[in-house]
Image: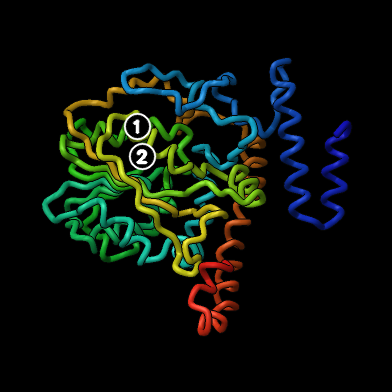
Amino acid sequence: FAHPFLFIAMAASSARPLLFLAALAAVANISFAFQPFGVTGLLSPLRHAPATSRSPLSLRMGSSADASSLERPLSKLRLIQHKQEAFWFYRYLSLVYDKVVNPGHWTEDMREASLVPAEISAEQQIVDVGGGTGFCTLGVIKAGGKPENIIMIDQSPHQLLQAKKKPALDLVEKLEGDAEDLPFETDSKDRYVSAGSIEYWPEPQRGICEAYRVLKPGGKACVIGPVHPTFPISRFFADLWMLFPTEQEYIDWFKAAGFEDVKITRIGPKWYHGVRRHGLIMGCSVTGVKKAAGESPLKMGPKVEQTAQKSNFAVNLFRLILGTLGGFWYFLVPVYMFLKHLLLLPLSLVWKNAHAKLM
């Protein structure tokens, strides 16, 4: 790639969108290579902290975490895993979220299955972090939570606007706020629920530590989110778009924050028939119990990103557009899986394991 931008032009003119995105990613990686010499690429995920080889999974209870230890590897751009880009991403997606995203990735039966481990009841004080349009909050109410005992919080006023249109959520308090800096007292909540939010947190470990802090002793956190794909093309687009953690990463984050009895419940659309190689936008429900009072034993350093932090509009826009293109792959995957499910239906009438073997 001696002339990377010529490569982009050739890829774009070939009318091959996958090649075009790969070309942009290649240029991004080339720009990373020059960062030690003072050149910062438009796609740099390191605009708030220096690069480091330390993994966030190396953190242990009682240790001190600096901002640089929580950065993304250079091979994983995750262009929408930033507060500003996520804000604008949902500025428009909020208009169709319940009609476009939920049917393909986050169905009612998935929601109900994911909330069973949370053991929700009417007397509990519950916070729904990243509550968005209120789809998960409605599930919390259906599972037994009282609307007047629930607070939903989201950084997107556009998502919350959709939630305010739902009569079933009239008694639920709605706040704008940051999952990594919750406006609640320590040891104040019985249940912490968060669905479809962790993938946009610049520092997932910090968000999990906040979940620990706000819970009362004996309280339980329930985080529902994506799982990382193993299929190469899906992995490329997942890492281009946002955070898709592995199941082990969830477990490590919870344990590092101080949670005990950490458990994972796998979920997924029925028509996937258990297939997980493409990753899932909603793929698991992770729960953990807080046993001791107080803040998390894991001490975090300064935040990597501030919600109100000034940033470069052109850079944000470029990242938003490219990240959204990467995310478009995950609007195609559930359609592909559903069509494959339908094609195998006739065969499944004579071969019971057709879907299990051929999906």
Q: Are marks 1 and 2 in contact (CB under 8 Å)?
A: yes
**Horizontally, is 231 left or right of 99 in the view?**
right
> Residue at 26% across / 52% down in the picture?
117
Q: Find disc 2 in the rendering and name its residue.
A: 177
Disc 1, SS: loop
Q: Which residue is mark 1?
A: 181
Residue at screen point 57% across, 20% down: 52
From this view, report whether residue 234 is shown above or below residue 104.
Answer: above
Kind of residue at badge 1: Asp
Q: Is residue 99 above or below residue 162?
A: below
The C terminus sits in image quarter: bottom right
Q: Is residue 247 left or right of residue 93?
A: left
Task: Work out how far the residue at label 1 is from the one at label 2, CA to CA, in angstroms.
Answer: 8 Å
Apparent side of residue 91 relative to residue 218 in the rendered image (left or right): right
Q: Position of residue 12 (x, y in %)?
A: 82, 51
The amino acid marked with disc number 2 is Gly
Residue 4: which numbered mark, if any? none
